[in-house]
Image: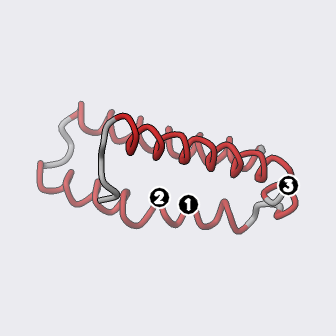
Amino acid sequence: MSAVVAAFVALVSVAVLGYLVGLAGVLRAEDELVLSRLAFFVATPALLFTTVARADLHAIFSPVLLTNLAGLFVVQVLYLGVAVLWWRRSRA
């Protein structure tokens, strides 16, 4: 769990640093666009990959996962029932 908290702290600190740099006017608008795309498309997936790579698989594949999947299935079936029967929507 501490790895998840550390990942969130890293993301929040980068966001705060970017906000402060934006307030100071250090970068041009084009630079901000490039850096935001770099952070979104490169840095965040890399951080997610390293966090998941270090995660304990027994913690991920636990009874909690089965409970979450069962809840997801129930909500999906309820939505499909409401969408088809009450709202008269097609599968598309």
Q: Label for residue 47?
A: 1
Side of 76 relative to 26 (left or right):
right
Residue 56 to residue 4: above or below: below
Whole-angstrom CA distance, mark 3 to mark 1, is 23 Å
Q: In the image, which disc is placed on residue 16? A: none
81, above or below 86, in the image? below
Q: Residue placed at 59% from the left, 67% from the top?
A: 49
Q: SS for tag 2?
A: helix
- Neighbours of disc 2 within 10 Å: few (<14), some (14-19), many (20+): some
Q: Which circle, 2 or 3, is nearer the viewer?
A: 3
Pick the residue in front: 23 or 10.
10
Q: Which is more N-terminal, label 1 or label 3?
A: 1
Q: What residue type is labelled 3?
A: Ser
**Residues at marks 2 and 1, CA–CA distance in whole angstroms:** 5 Å
Q: Is residue 89 left or right of residue 82?
A: left
Whether label 2 touches label 1, CB < 8 Å? yes
Q: Name the residue under label 2.
A: 44
Task: Please provide percent x and percent y for residue 4.
Answer: 68, 47
Mark 1 surroundings within 10 Å by alpha-carbon count, few (fewer than 14), some (14 through 19), many (20 or more): some
Tell me the residue at 29%/54% (across/down): 36
- On residue 62, the disc is 3
Number of numbered discs overlaid on the protein picture = 3
Disc with the residue nearer the chain's start (2 vs 3): 2
The residue at 29%/39% (across/down) is 21
Closer-to-camera residue (23/37): 37
Identify residue type, mark 2: Thr
Q: How crowded is mark 3: few (under 14 residues within 10 Å), some or many (20 or more)?
A: few
Nearer the camera: disc 3 or disc 1: 3
- Residue 44: x %, y % from top left: 47, 58
Q: What kind of residue is marked 1?
A: Leu
